[in-house]
Image (cartoon, rainbow, N blue to C red):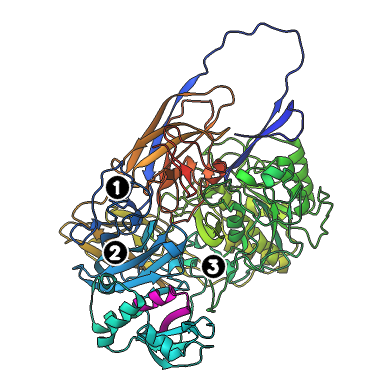
Amino acid sequence: MLLVCFATSLTRCFRIFLCIGLSVLISACGGSGGGAPVTNPPPVSPPTSTVSGTITVAPGAVVDSDVNDPVPVRISNDSVVTAQSLPNPVTLGGYLNIAGTGYSGDSFFSGDPVDFYSIGLVAGQTITLTMAEAPLTTVDLDLYLLNAAGDTVVDFSDSTTSAVEALTVPSTGNYFIVVDAFDGYSNYTLRVGVGITQAKTHTAGRLVLSDAFVPGEMIVKFRDGTAGTAAAASPALRASSMGLQMKAGGDTRRAMLMSLGDKQRRQATFNALGIPTANKHRFKFKSEEDQLKYETLMAIKALRNRADVLYAEPNYIRTASAVPTDPLYSSQWHYPLINLPAAWDKEKGDPGVTVAIIDTGVLMNHPDLLGQFSADGGYDFISNDFISGDGQPGIDSDPNDTGDSVGVGSSSFHGTHVAGTVAAATTFFPAPGVRGGAGVAPGVKLMPVRVLGRGGVGGHYDIMQGVRYAAGLSNDSGVTLNASQRADVINLSLGGGGYSQAEQDIYTLVRAAGVVVVAAAGNANSSALSYPASYAGVISVSSVDRNKQKAYYSNFGAAVDVAAPGGDARGDADGDNFKDGVLSTHGDDSGAALDYKYNDMQGTSMASPHMAGVVALMKSAYSGLTPDVVDSLLLSGAIVEDIGTAGRDDLFGHGLIDANKAVIEAITLGSGTPPPPSPALLAVSPSGLNLGDSAVTGLLYVKNSGGGALNITTVSDDAAWLTVSAETVDADLLGFYRVTIDKSGLTLGVYQAEITFTSSVNSVVVPVTMQVVAQAINGDAGYQYVLLIDAADFSVLDQWDGDVEGGSYSYRFDNVPFPAGRQYYVIGGTDINNDGNICEPGEACGAYFSLSNFSVIDAAGPHTGLDFVSGFDAGVGASASALFKEGGITLKRKQVQSPIKGVLRNK
């Protein structure tokens, strides 16, 4: 627990702790009074307890079998013959190095320049390689896809300016994936998934063999030269000096078209460009054209490394094309679950409606949030300068999230994730440059209010000021927003124990002002009251997973009003390489520059903005919407789907919010006439199943996502190994269907089939993928180092080391002292580059309760069953940053110096 004192006297202070996406725990600590001296009793040993749990390997997680860490058993995967078998889908953490580069360890002297992986792949799947080391000028990993025999290149990706390589699988079959170190050393993450992902967006500088470009040609622009130097020579002479031929151009002020020349000249060209022969023909190609394309890319790579070349690129062949709208929307399962598509047909949000995000602030320049903010610009109410960490004394008018990292990893960017769920920019028609995912109410405006800062902490006084500001009440900023400026909806994805009359009074005032307040119910899987969600007048939101079941972490009880999607990041049912959490806007500041990106997170923190966004849609459709009206509609069941016990229950409140029903009710209230019903439309979630090499069953949810009526007429599949049966359905045969596969008699390989659901209105086809392997490939998050960390000073009390057994790890710390006030965190991860740090990019990481929801372990033992998930995130996901001071944690048994930021572990 972080101790933050707000006065010079230590007789009164507050202990404050934020579990990102979980809770703010606040308790007063009073000073002692005076009195007569007493005889001190003899010292008493503090009570002790056991701290133990199980680490589950994240879905599809596998570790490179020959990493640099000398502790685990090393198994070479350096050739086709010794290739490591992978499941599908997979997220793998690996390490490569050229001999003599990188950190001391198993491969420093001998080098480990290449890793081979055998895998069955499906047409359209994306293979993504993410390099972890920096700068890119000293690291160059390339990605190859070889045929089933392992002797011919199918595709190749080489980026000189990006840390990401990506390829798309051309056809279903068995392949070899090769990760090759052209230069330097680095951890890396290799991901194989399905569907459209961020990696399919072509990054500037990436060279891909299968791209359409003219073989042997390149476009080159030289830097301006100085008279009398070689750089100032004529373009033809400059090209000739590099073994190239001029084809068009000739003006050094413009880009010029150049050629490798004929086959006889190419060796001289490669010699002139300094390309080693070993790199020129490392693999065979299926045609002379592909070989020439590869040589063209290698020449471009060499040109880009020259000081006198401004840029070099292929001569791409262009055709007419359209960019898909919001490419990550296909991974946002949580929106169809609450009937958002049907609601969007009627209402997408009005810019006159504002939702306040009272949180860690928001990344104001995130590309998917630009233009989505209210005119007032928001505010930063963090009054403690150390917690604020933004370099501005006291509170200020800049709510930008400057990050809550305190020295290692990336910041949580919790508020940015929440904001994107409410109102990320969303395009409903094909348009160039569309990126990212969708928001619940993309037409409304966001008011960012920063109340949580460094280390993810904040005081409830600051939170109260933020709430007052958003609601147009007087506050410490001196700015009182008028009725047209204030927020219509306030979202609070934070909470904790401890009733405060001061807070209750504020929420009573806010409700009286006509503002709807929505808050997260909490993530302790408990019926204990969490505040502010449990205050009168606040809508408390519990969490469901993609199967409409209570999320395993979600709080429940009499205070819960409604349920919404919060996700369960322990699974990946559709194999899209995003865990089944909630996907939204995010950031990564672990590197030299801030990277705007997208991330899946789980928690009631993610459920709450779904509800806030739906209320914003209702307010857009009916300007007279008040908190009383929302309560009445919830009580009547008019805007929810009753998914639990009939009527209200303690798991889901009045039910799962239904965006379509909510918008219909709002339109009806505004006009007196309900809108025409949306046409009935059959929908299935998830849109595809990837059961990998070990799972034999999965669930599909079949529903009517529109209005009107429909019923299922037939359910069919096209494979003998596939069975579909109704599990829980209604009279129209809508509901849950069980998918089961039987691998008996099937040969090794990857299989794909389709399930067709036909209704009285439309049909939906669901692809199902699975893999038959000689031996099941167990999940493996690598050799784990689990740290027991003192929450007060972030020192390591103890460490457990161990390898995977049957897809999990059982860690245990005995005789852990728990003197009064002592609290701990548990975090585990790998050190595959052997630099003495865990949880770096490309390495596995996990924490109790999760990386996005840290939980404190206090004296109320025994502490068994502290289970969590560890896996390789490729930089996606919250980090352990909020736990650690600048410079990491002092090692318990051996100090290891490293230039790389991370969580130091004990060797």
**In the rendering, which numbered label is found on residue 773?**
none
Quadrant assignment for the N terminus: top right
Most distant residue in the top direction: 39
Q: Against 219, is 818 above or below?
A: above
Q: Which residues are magenta?
A: 297-315
Assign a secondary structure to mark 2.
strand
User: Depth-wise, is mark 3 or mark 1 nearer the camera?
Assistant: 1
In the rendered image, which residue does mark 2 sit on? 178
Category of crowding for the residue at label 2, using alpha-carbon neighbours closer than 10 angstroms: few (below 14), some (14–19), many (at least 20): many
The residue at the point 46 percent across, 59 percent down is: 134
- Label 1 residue SS: loop
Q: Residue at x 68, y 69 (%)?
A: 673
Q: Is residue 180 left or right of residue 496?
A: left
Q: Residue 811 appears at what percent x and percent y?
A: 38, 34
Q: Nearer the viewer, mark 2 or mark 3?
A: 2
- Which residue is outermost to the left? 745
Residue 810 lies in quadrant: top left
- The type of residue carrying mark 1 is Asp
| Disc 3 target residue | 341
User: Is residue 726 at least partly visible in the picture?
Assistant: no
Q: Are marks 1 and 2 in contact (CB under 8 Å)?
A: no
Mark 2 → mark 3, Cα distance in angstroms: 41 Å
- Please identify the quarter of the rendering in which residue 587 is found: bottom right
Mark 1: give few (<14), some (14-19) or many (20+) Cα within 10 Å.
some
Q: In the image, what residue type sits under mark 2? A: Val
Q: Who is closer to the viewer here, 68 or 310?
A: 310
Residue that label 1 marks:
106
Instruction: Name the foreground residue: 632 vs 314.
Output: 314
Q: Is residue 421 visible?
A: yes
Q: Earlier in the sequence, mark 3 or mark 1?
A: 1
